[in-house]
Amino acid sequence: MDTSTGASAGSETPLTEGELRLVRQAILMVSSYGTPRVIVAGLRYGDLILERCEHLAGEAGVRVVALETATPGRLDLAVEPRTR
């Protein structure tokens, strides 16, 4: 899995980069270490990074699922194996 933040990383900004880093780590935990599921909760910029996260997850053989949240303007993401 490529976790670089080079030119191919998309249009991340300093505001979104920290949250994208959290999701990348969750993807790594599930894809490489066999963690059954990781939830990254309360993302402020989740809607801006969702497509990129889905792409990174697909490359790693896992999936990202957007979850409902009780807090308006926030997004929770679950990273889990594709077989689930």
Image (spheres, grey):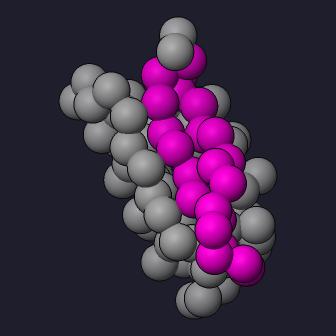
Asked where in the image residue 32 lies, by quadrant, the reply is top left
Q: How many marks?
A: 0
Residue 8 visible somewhere in the drawing:
no
Along the line of sight, which residue is nearer the eye, 67 or 61?
A: 67
- Residue furthest left in the image: 33
Is-magenta flag for residue 41? no
The residue positioned 63% from the left and 68% from the top of the image is 70
- Residue furthest top in the image: 83
Q: Is residue 58 above or below residue 26?
A: above
Residue 80 x, y percent position in the rendering = 47, 30
The residue positioned 57% from the left and 72% from the top of the image is 43
Along the line of sight, which residue is nearer the eye, 8 or 61?
A: 61
Q: Is 4 left or right of 53, judged from the image as shown?
A: left
Q: Is 47 left or right of 60, judged from the image as shown?
A: right
Q: Is residue 38 above or below residue 62?
A: below
Quadrant placement of the N terminus = top left
- Residue furthest bottom in the image: 14
Is-magenta flag for residue 79? yes
Report the span colored magenta: 61-82
The residue positioned 76% from the left and 52% from the top of the image is 51
Q: Is 36 left or right of 1, judged from the image as shown?
A: left
- Residue furthest front in the image: 70
Q: Is residue 53 above or below residue 73?
A: above
Residue 72 x, y percent position in the rendering = 72, 78
Residue 46 x, y percent position in the rendering = 66, 67
Residue 36 visible somewhere in the drawing:
yes
The residue positioned 38% from the left and 34% from the top of the image is 37
Q: Is residue 81 above or below residue 10?
A: above
Residue 45 x, y percent position in the rendering = 67, 77
